Amino acid sequence: MDYTANPLSLEQILATDGLLLLDFGTNWCGWCGRARYAVDAALAGRSDVRHVRVEDGPGRRLGRHFGVRLWPTLVLLRDGVELARAVRPADRAEVEALLAGVASAP
């Protein structure tokens, strides 16, 4: 799955039920390319987490709303409320740590 400009509106994100992992970055970003495999591996078999890659950059209000400054930035939300985030995750273990605890909590 590639990064897509405006895959969801802010209103849709805030109205999403359950867990949503927003993955901010770009298709040409080296950091994003390396993190892609870690994110995909950590989410394999995790049907409880919806994953959306959001293309970010100048003039992209969604990234600004979530305070994204470096790519990739992962923002984990439950029912539209931010629970945790990771900036430039280095490996699968870091992404799994982001998901651990919050994914199973009520």
Image (cartoon, grey):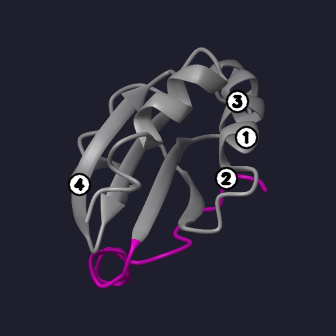
Q: Residues within 10 Å of mark 2 (few under 14, many from 20)?
A: some
**Residue 15 x, y percent position in the rendering:** 30, 85
Amino acid residing under circle 3? Ala
- For the residues labelled 3 and 2, the Cα–Cα distance comes to 15 Å
Judge whether residue 73 is colored magenta. no
Look at the picture and state if 5 lies above or below 26.
below
Circle number at residue 82: 4
Name the magenta segment's main secondary structure: loop
Residue 72 in sight: no
**Residue 3 x, y percent position in the rendering:** 67, 53
Helix, strand or loop under label 3? helix
**Residue 59 x, y percent position in the rendering:** 38, 52
Look at the picture and state if 74 lies above or below 10.
above
Q: Which residue shows up at 66% across the image and 38% down it?
A: 39
- For the residues labelled 1 and 2, the Cα–Cα distance comes to 6 Å
Q: Residues within 10 Å of mark 3 (few under 14, many from 20)?
A: some
Most foreground residue, 14 or 104: 104
- For the residues labelled 4 and 1, the Cα–Cα distance comes to 24 Å
Hey, which residue is sitting farthest top in the picture?
Answer: 90
Mark 2 lies on residue? 3
Is 9 left or right of 35, judged from the image as shown?
left
Which is more foreground, mark 4 or mark 1?
Answer: 4
Provide the residue span drawn in magenta.
1-18
Helix, strand or loop under label 2? loop
Which is more foreground, mark 3 or mark 2?
Answer: 3
Q: Which residue shows up at 32% across the image and 49% down it?
A: 102
Mark 3 lies on residue? 38
Q: Earlier in the sequence, mark 4 or mark 1?
A: 1
Look at the picture and state if 68 lies above or below 66.
above
Q: Earlier in the sequence, mark 3 or mark 1?
A: 1
Amino acid residing under circle 1? Asn
- For the residues labelled 3 and 1, the Cα–Cα distance comes to 15 Å
